Image (tube, helix red, strand yellow):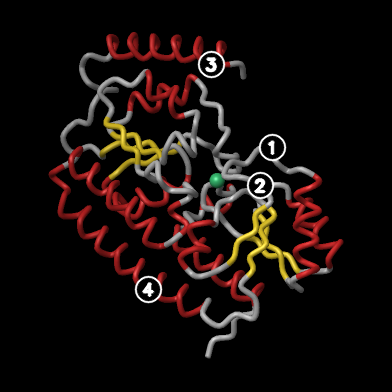
Amino acid sequence: MHKKKLILFIVIAVALVGVWCLLSRDGRYGAKRAGEHLSVVTSGYVPYALAKEIGAEKIHLTMLVPPGTEPHHFEPTPGSVIAVNEADVFVYISPRVEPWVSDILKGLGSVRALEAGPSEKEEDPHVWMTPYGALSMAERIADALIKADPSNAAYYRENLKKFEKETELLHRDFAEGLKNCKSRAVVHVGHLAFGALAQAYGLELRSLSGTSHQGEHSVRKLADLIRFIRKNKVSAVFTEPFVSPELAQTVARETRVRVFPLYTVEEVGTEDFQSGKTYEGFMRQNLENLREGLQCPLR
Ligand SMILES: [Zn+2]
């Protein structure tokens, strides 16, 4: 979609919301009524999965990026703008990860908007790829929910505490599980989403492209990766299940290595979305695949 067209869409959508509000002065479509669930809209699956942990039964949760859709270059529709304007809380990661959020933020009225993601100084903005990075996002989300809905503060705090316990266990299992590996080279045929994870657990990351999903898949870079695999006798490559699986297949064919998926949690398949796959669920699968690919026996 062209930028002009998008802006026009947003202007129309904001006008529609205005009319909508005028027509519903009884508050039917407006702010939260007593006894009603807090309405939370998230950009994509990372804040969705985390908000679900904290808000659980007390919030009505929806996300803008549909399941199976690439999150960095999503194009919001007028419906996205309306959904955000009707929410009590809008949680997104950061315009660094979701440039399209900036346009939505321009037209916001009284909605409480929370940027839950990384600070500017983070080199790899995919901070939730370490358990403690995800916890700090969950803490910010809990804060926002408590401010928007103080009557359920104890409930949100309790859920945050549970998530904290899960985080400790998850971190321990990553640290233990990746301690003794035959290889520490994570060759990733995808975008640079595992920098923080690699750094936290002492792995060496080689990614095909930069921190967003598009461009940069040059033939030269692919050839570099293949050379690296051969030279260092790497026995597995990791791929993003939703992004160019054929590229990973090409590398695997050339080098006869095995292919394992790594999940960024940014994207979620329809089935996983419907079954409510948790952040922890994705991360445990990542750990299992890393351990198999890098050959890390448990002692
Ligand atoms: Zn990403």
**Circle 2 sits in a helix, a strand or a loop, which is it?**
loop
* Quarter occupied by the N terminus: top right
Residue under the point 45% across and 22% down: 103
Name the residue beneath numbered marker 2: 209
Residue type, numbered disc 4 = Leu
Indicate the position of residue 72 as horizontal and vertical percent values: 55, 37
Residue type, numbered disc 2 = Ser
Q: Is residue 291 left or right of residue 112?
A: right
Say if 298 sits above or below 122 in the image. Answer: below
Dots 4 and 1: beta carbons under 8 Å?
Answer: no
Name the residue beneath numbered marker 1: 215
Residue nearest the observer in this picture, 271 or 158: 158
Badge 1, how many Cα within 10 Å: few under 14, some, many 20+? few
Indicate the position of residue 34 as horizontal and vertical percent values: 16, 34
Name the residue beneath numbered marker 4: 169
Residue type, numbered disc 1 = Gly
Residue nearest the observer in this picture, 293 or 202: 202
Name the residue beneath numbered marker 3: 6
Say if 206 sits above or below 63 in the image. Answer: below
Residue under the point 68% across and 47% down: 243
Please state which of the two labelled residues, at mark 1 or mark 3, is closer to the viewer: 1
Residue type, numbered disc 3 = Leu
Dots 2 and 1: beta carbons under 8 Å?
Answer: yes
